[in-house]
Amino acid sequence: MRLSRYFLPVLRDVPKEAEIVSHRLMLRAGMIRQQASGLYSWLPLGYKVLMKVQKIIEEEQNRSGAIELLMPTIQSADLWRESGRYEAYGKEMLRIEDRHEREFLYGPTNEEMVTDIFRAYVKSYKDLPLNLYHIQWKFRDEVRPRFGTMRSREFLMKDAYSFDITKDDAVRAYHRMFVAYLRTYARMGLTAIPMQADTGPIGGDLSHEFIILADTGESAVFCHRDLIEKPIPPKDTDFRGDLSPIVDDWTSLYAATEEMVDKAAYESAVPEDKRVSARGIEVGHIFYFGTKYSAPMKATVTGPDGKDSPVHMGSYGVGLTRVVPAIIEASHDENGIIWPVSVAPFEAVLINLKAGDADTDAACEKVYAELQAAGIDVLYDDRDQPAGSKFATADLVGIPYQIILGPRGLKSGEVEIKHRKSGERETLPLSGGVDRLRSLVEPQRMDDI
Ligand code: ATP
Ligand code: MG
């Protein structure tokens, strides 16, 4: 992509309304634009990151055996009356009437609708296990939308729903999602810690929130330090096998949010030097809720004994439009965003230090073509702008590598590579720049971990 032909409306000034760094940087880097309270447009650079996040989520959901479909944003009120949630949901639900005065709503979540799909087609235990997911916009009329897309009213969520004949099978489905989530966040360069969450009237221990540690997080969290460094399950993990040893290993170390923490239990379970009490951002939530929806909605399956019983369900959410600012909260400096390669809007930016100079332009065009041929997602800053402003933009929007070429380097046959994260600079022979960049970028794509 040539920057001169791209749409990247960066802001020089720090927007006053933004309270946290990710919100400020998303506005300044031209990633999002607020359209009304809690409603955002995703501008091209932001949208590119969002789609990279989506792809990782899809790959890991698919790997675990979940199947993608797409349900509408608008749902009928009658469906929600069946579960009893139409009234109960309260003011967070956006209610809509069509021209025939029929009642609808903009879905805040999809348990009812997916249960309806399930009951229409699945009748036998032989068709289970089943896990259906979609990635769709949700609307919740939050009391206090804030922090940009971190807590917005319309937001993009991946929500998966598992269906099983017994609770034991549902636990296995839960474990598959638990492991898939560990892998998903790690591939985005995030350390997300599963923490015990409230199960409410359902009871049991099958509810975890996945939390990113960040000073601006909305909840206080308490956990064992070893969870931060824990290696994640590899991609050849057998999702059809027994995953309970992995889940047990992770959950054996204490981790809880403020709603769930028992200070005495925390202090007795975690030695003092291993205690981490910090703030966190909830980027995902997995939950087993048994027959809460299937019983009232009569989603039953026939078991091996010929008897019908309501199916056991769980739901598993990830807020994509929250994950993006969470990554920024975890990875930035005073100059801007520092994207992990796997979710970066571009992997590299080629900076032409003297656009308009025939030799420099020609050399840059050649490197640009080579970078594209090498499969690198590259932005070419071909604008006629001072070098300083190009560096500032590259740093602000957080592209992991800058490859810098100007008349002086050209004369000595050299190109420079700057690492956004460490600030390190390497000078290389012009002919070796592309290969070097490739060797830096490829392992960090994390598509093979
Ligand atoms: P919170 O406690 O932050 O309001 P929640 O418990 O209501 O979250 P869930 O219903 O479990 O959230 O939704 C699943 C995921 O969707 C959350 O883990 C979060 O990542 C995301 N999410 C929920 N509400 C919002 C929102 N208003 N804006 C952006 N993402 C959201
Ligand atoms: Mg909420």
Image (cartoon, grey):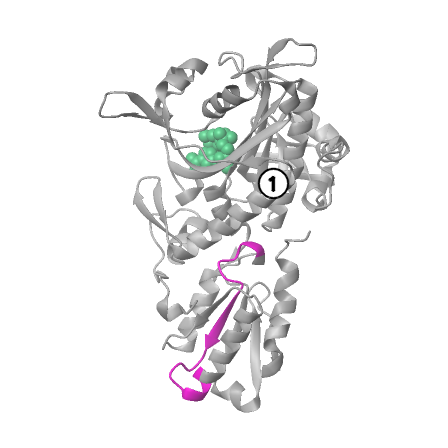
147 magenta-colored: no
**Which quadrant of the view contains residue 59?**
top right
Residue at the spot 76% in from the left edge and 31% down from the top edge: 242
User: In the displayed structure, does residue 348 sit left or right of residue 140?
Assistant: right
- Looking at the image, in which quadrant does ligand 2 appear? top left
Which residue carries the number 1 mark?
A: 62
344 magenta-colored: yes
Up the image or down, 358 lies above or below 237; here it is below
Residue at the spot 63% in from the left edge and 66% down from the top edge: 440
Task: Residue lying at the far left in this picture: please name it.
Answer: 99
Query: Which sits in the foreground, 438 or 280?
Result: 438
Quadrant where the N terminus sits is bottom left
- How far across and down, in percent of the image, does residue 168 sit? 70, 20
Q: Which residues are magenta?
A: 342-361
What amino acid type should be assigned to the residue bearing mark 1? Asn
Residue at the spot 32% in from the left edge and 47% down from the top edge: 34
Q: Give the secondary structure at mark 1.
A: helix
